[in-house]
Amino acid sequence: MLRIEENAPLQHLNTFGVAATARYLVTLRHPEALAALSRGLPAADCPPLVMGGGSNVLFTRDFPGVVILNRLAGIRVVAADDRHVRVQAGAGEDWDGFVRYCLERGWYGLENLILIPGTVGAAPVQNIGAYGVELKDVFEELEGWDLPTGRRLRLTAAECRFGYRDSVFKGPLQDRFLITAVTLRLGLQPCPATEYRDLQEELRGVPHGERHPRAVGEAVVRLRRRKLPDPREMGNAGSFFKNPVVSRARFEDLQARCGPLPAYDLGPAGVKLAAAALIERSGWKGKHRGRCGVHDRQPLVLVNLGGACGQEILELAEAVRAAVHQAFGVWLEPEPRIL
Ligand code: FAD
Ligand code: EPU
């Protein structure tokens, strides 16, 4: 039931399009195969890596363990009342396809997260976010499998410890918990979130009464197509760096030294700086280095210009981080998983 491939190529399985191999690769299509997977998992020197769409990973070398490609499918309504519907999706479902499926049925809340590449199962891993909405805003619970013990578990939002591009799956549960299904709580009444500045501008011509979630989804699609490179045309993993959060005192000191900087006030949590602006002002926007570079419209995105290897992209990222640190005293943290 479970075919294990050896020395499997990964180039077509990651959106950076970098060449690498996995010592073993298995494709998981049925939950029943999980037990066979646990019995068939090779020895302890062979660590597991769960992968969905490969849109938030950078391979800098061949992977020495077993890549488990999550293709668990299925979407079903688990509960509904007159205001909400609880929808469960298999972790291997395509995220954007799932968002459109919900929008078409009048289940609202995901419209701002349209067109994010990858799978449903990876969405909780970094608590995906865009245009003023994060996964945690609609999250109900998830199911998964603790690989070392073989236990099936159900986790609540509190147990997932969601933060900005963060969760327990990037911490203690990394590489040991395989998410099999995610349940979201979606609204049956339109209640679109349109506060994000760029989204407000994109919707300026649309009268308030016509700002239906479908119109919001279409606006987000237009914004994303304009701003972000399509990985099918130019390898990338979306934002390569997170927006750094600093204290208000540090922010004021930075502005006094460096002039006005775009930023977002998080209240007592501090101030979120626009890393794109820091990179642009460090002189790296649109710069190339060998076969990779910093995107010319969105400097948070590093791009594979053709044939770059993961190590080259990592070296470019280090050069950008060093330049930003030199100019602003802030270390940018990578967003994708570097392997
Ligand atoms: P993968 O890259 O396959 O995996 C990412 C991580 O999740 C790995 O550590 C992996 O081990 C883990 N993982 C994956 N599936 C599972 C599972 N079932 N169980 C346990 N762990 C798992 N992100 C945003 O938040 N907002 C954006 O606006 C956004 N825009 C993007 C635009 C572009 C053009 C691209 C290329 C990426 C963008 N991203 C964005 C990043 C990316 O789309 C998300 O992080 C997405 O959730 C990754 O999904 P994936 O299936 O490709 O994950
Ligand atoms: N900016 C510049 N120069 C530029 C581009 C942007 O100075 O060339 C400044 C502008 O002031 C702008 C600000 O950066 O207002 C923020 O830009 P944008 O709204 O495009 O958002 P971002 O911070 O670059 C974040 C997420 C994206 C998400 C968008 C929309 C992170 C790390 N990135 O990007 O997520 O789609 O907001 O919400 O938080 C991803 O995680 O992979 C990703 C693409």
Image (cartoon, grey):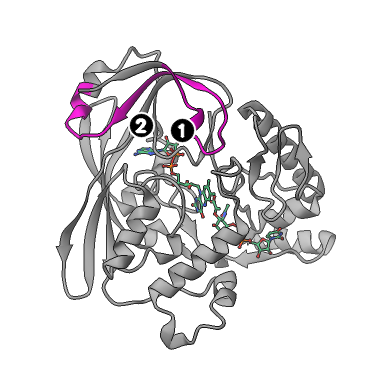
Q: Is mark 2 within 8 Å of ligand 1?
A: no
Q: Is residue 324 left or right of residue 42?
A: right
Closer to the N terminus: mark 2 or mark 1? 1
Q: Which residues are magenta?
A: 7-36
**Does the residue at mark 2 contact the one at mark 1 (Cβ under 8 Å)?**
yes
Residue at mark 2 to residue at mark 1: CA–CA distance: 9 Å
Label 1's element? Answer: helix
Question: Disc 1 designates what residue?
Answer: 13
In-front residue for pair 2/175: 2
Residue at image position (49%, 20%) is 21
- Percent coordinates x, y for residue 327 in the rendering: 81, 49
Nearest the eye: 339 or 53: 53
Picture coordinates of residue 265, whole percent (x, y): 60, 67
| Residue 206 is a magenta residue | no
Sort mark 2 into few (<14), some (14-19) or many (20+) by Cα contacts within 10 Å: some
| Residue 322 appears in the figure | no
> Within the image, what quadrant is residue 121 found in?
top left
The image quadrant that residue 213 belongs to is bottom left
Left or right: where does residue 224 sit relative to residue 276?
left
Q: Is residue 48 left or right of residue 277?
A: left
Asked where in the image residue 90 lies, by quadrant, the reply is top left
Residue mark closest to the camera, 2 vs 1: 1
For the question of whether residue 218 can be seen, the reply is yes
Mark 2: amino acid: Leu
* Residue 281 screen position, x and y as percent: 79, 54
In the foreground, 169 or 9: 9
Amino acid type at mark 1: Leu
Identity of the residue drawn at 54% across and 43% down: 232
Q: Residue beneath label 2, please?
A: 69
